[in-house]
Amino acid sequence: MHRQRRAKIIATIGPASSDQKTIRKLFDAGADVFRLNFSHGTHDDHKKAYETIREVEKTVQRPIAVLMDLQGPKLRVGTFEDGGVVLQEGRTFRLDLAKAPGDSLRATLPHPEIFKALKPGKTLLIDDGHLRLEVRKCGPDFAETKVIVAGSLSDRKGVNIPDITLPIPALTDKDKKDLEFGLELGVDWVGLSFVQSPNDLLELKALTNGRAMIIAKLEKPAALDYLEEIVELADGVMIARGDLGVEVPLEKVPVLQKRIIRVCRRSGKPAVVATQMLESMTNSPTPTRAEASDVATAIYEGADAVMLSAETATGKFPVRAIAIMDRIIAQVEADEDYDHIMDSGRSQPEETAADAITSGARQISTTLNAAAIVTYTASGSTTLRAARERPPTMILCITPEERVARILSLAWGVHAVINNNYTHANDIGVVASETALREGLAQQGDVLVITAGVPFGAVGSTNMIRVLQINAEH
């Protein structure tokens, strides 16, 4: 079984989708990766979901990636005497560290780090930007603000500070406990929230120590000042458009999305577009036309994957949401202009043998109308390099490592198969042919373009390219 598309789909597991029957239906509908959101649920909930995904994986006999998404710091106001207040435009409103319940004049903001970083003239956004406050006066334990955009404010609403890099680590104590739990389970990818600079990734890399791949979630404007460095350090990037869309003007989000995808593709790192992609399907059996266009735009821009959150975690139509996203992606990729767009976005290969061979494989596959590009890899690097080229055909990855096959479930155009029945260069043609036929990627007489590193098992040693016609004499 292989997908009839190249971009991948991530489904978030939640109360609407955690049982084995639904997870199987989500996979059959098109989900390639399952996300465990550690902002919600208990460790027992996530363990049960993880084990269920692995049971489905055995049943379908396809590698499935599991992404654990760390919560990160959550900045929130405190509680109110009557559960909430209404802030009036132009009025003064105080935020401080006092523990007393709030009222129409003040509220608790239990984050001293914020007050240390604030300056007069800075903006505070509350409740996903529905309320906007301007700092007029501040100190180490308070801020006097003016209400610029008024509205209702209730208990524990979130706070965003768009103009400031906050002295808050991306990994909280909760995140560290969750991380160790997730790594013990065997998750394949770890999503890091609240990334503001490359330094935020260094601690996570040390803690994971190669046990999982890292996705940097870009939701803070400060991170964009270090975009290239963050992409270089991370194994992939998620464009978390929810918080990003709160902290930057909405009209900038599409431009930033395109820029981030371009940088990721140039570096050969998977880019995920997330948040509100088919949001209306949380309660509706069909998305809006604008949502369908939003998904299509991400695919035309070259995203490796698109993600559903509430649509599959708590929505009424989780399987239908995946199926519709699958159809949208397939329709875009069938557009005669799609491959031309992907080709126009290719970067020049680096001056290495591996890059030259991978670039050459793409060109040969196009010229010969090959059925597939076959990559032999132990680490996944060869296959990710092939995905960066965005060839007009599927990439069949043959790897002896189950973990690598799972990780590559997130990569554009990759169909990964676990196989260690090759020990010599003479074996690769036979194994490639048999695998391509069995997986439905090729037929008798089709051409395969094969890349590999000899000797086998040496990371980053791609040094061979071979053209093979299935069942032809060699």
Image (spheres, helix red, strand yellow):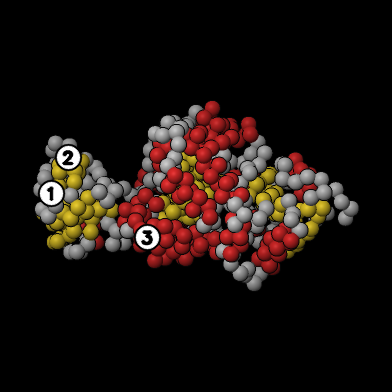
**Residue 410: in sight, yes or no?**
no
**Residue 144: in sight, yes or no?**
yes
Question: What whole-number distance in Å separates the C-alpha atoms at marks 2 and 3?
Answer: 32 Å
For the N terminus, give its image quadrant. top right
Q: Amino acid at mark 1?
A: Gln
Marked residue nearer the N-terminal end (2 or 3) = 2
Task: Identify the residue at horizontal 71%, vertical 41% (top origin).
Answer: 439
Task: Identify the residue at horizontal 76%, vertical 43% (top origin).
Answer: 437
Task: Identify the residue at horizontal 59%, vertical 57% (top origin).
Answer: 337
Residue on which disc 1 sits: 88
Marked residue nearer the N-terminal end (1 or 3) = 1
Q: As drawn, is 418 to the left or to the right of 238?
A: right
Of labels 2 and 3, the one closer to you: 3
Q: Amino acid at mark 2?
A: Gly
Asked where in the image residue 115 lies, by quadrant, the reply is bottom left
Residue on which disc 2 sits: 84
Viewer-nearest residue: 250 or 207: 250
Q: Position of residue 174 (x, y in %)?
A: 37, 44
Question: What whole-number distance in Å separates the C-alpha atoms at marks 1 and 3?
Answer: 28 Å
At label 2, counting other C-alpha atoms closer than 10 Å, the crowd grade (few under 14, some 14-19, many 20 or more) is some
Question: What whole-number distance in Å separates the C-alpha atoms at marks 2 and 1?
Answer: 13 Å
Q: As drawn, is 142 to the left or to the right of 310?
A: left
For label 2, the SS is strand
Q: Amino acid at mark 3?
A: Lys
Q: Is residue 365 above or below residue 400?
A: below
Q: Position of residue 21 (x, y in %)?
A: 54, 27
For label 3, the SS is helix
Residue on which disc 3 sits: 252
Asked where in the image residue 65 lies, by quadrant, the reply is top right
